[in-house]
Image: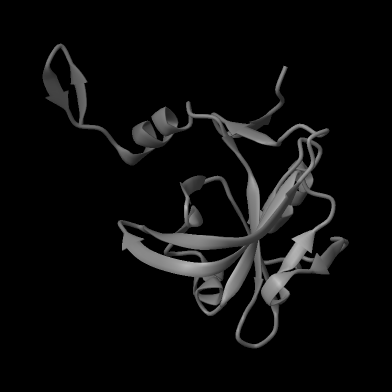
């Protein structure tokens, strides 16, 4: 419901999504290795710092994503923060039916999770907790290592599209 003059109004999922899209976010690619040793990667923009002590971060995955089940089997994962020149990479990892790793440079990190190169920042994490919440799963990772680049700008997602910082 939305409030207008103290009165509640009904709203639809599209209206809510449009309003949520007003909040600009960075873009990350969650990477890991599933129980069969296959590479996993999925684009998300629901990333947040949770705690500095212990060092915890979170991201959300839709329950309907095929990658969600595969990520659930990982012990650890890497959260690759994308640079503003990596919009195509974001689109590639958001697709379902393609080879997401075609022409992607990476190195193996902790727990064998792929670290995409280059990146703006990467947080290598051990899975700490997972919570079902509505149509999504909230995954919390304990940061075991990180690195970042102070020279590049982030890829920003706002109102359904990629944006640049001015």
Expressed as whole percent of the image width and height from the top left, the position of residue 131 reads 35, 64
Q: Residue at x 48, y 29 (%)?
A: 23
- Classify residue 46 as left or right of residue 8: right
Identify whether 37 is placed above or below 120.
below
Any part of residue 142 in sight = yes
Expressed as whole percent of the image width and height from the top left, the position of residue 115 reads 76, 62
Any part of residue 100 in sight = no
Q: Residue at x 40, y 28 (%)?
A: 19
Q: Residue at x 75, y 67 (%)?
A: 114
Expressed as whole percent of the image width and height from the top left, the position of residue 94 reads 64, 55
Q: Residue furthest top?
A: 5
Identify whether 111 is placed above or below 25.
below
Tell which of 125 and 139 is nearer to you.
125
Q: Which part of the image, by quadrant, shows the N terminus?
A: top left
Q: Residue furthest bottom?
A: 36
Residue 125 figure quarter: bottom right
Tell which of 49 and 103 is nearer to you.
49
Tell which of 26 and 87 is nearer to you.
26
Tell which of 5 and 129 is nearer to you.
129
- Classify residue 23 as left or right of residue 114: left
- Classify residue 131 as left or right of residue 24: left
Q: Which part of the image, by quadrant, shows the C terminus?
A: top right
Identify whether 19 is placed above or below 143.
above
Figure disc tally: 0
């Amino acid at each position: 419901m939305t409030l207008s003059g103290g009165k509640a109004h009904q709203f639809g999922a599209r209206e809510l999504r449009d309003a949520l899209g007003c909040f600009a976010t960075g873009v990350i690619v969650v990477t890991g290795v599933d129980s069969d040793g296959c590479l996993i990667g999925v684009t998300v923009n629901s990333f947040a710092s949770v705690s500095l002590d212990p060092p915890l971060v979170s991201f959300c995955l839709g329950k309907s994503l095929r990658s969600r089940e595969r990520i659930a089997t990982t012990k650890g994962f890497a959260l690759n923060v994308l640079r503003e020149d990596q919009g195509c990479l974001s689109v590639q990892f958001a697709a379902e039916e393609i080879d997401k790793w075609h022409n992607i440079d990476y190195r193996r990190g902790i727990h064998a999770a792929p670290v995409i190169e280059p990146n703006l920042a990467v947080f290598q994490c051990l899975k700490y907790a997972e919570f079902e919440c509505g149509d999504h799963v909230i995954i919390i990772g304990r940061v075991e290592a990180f690195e970042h680049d102070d020279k590049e700008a982030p890829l920003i997602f706002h109102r359904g599209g990629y944006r640049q910082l001015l």
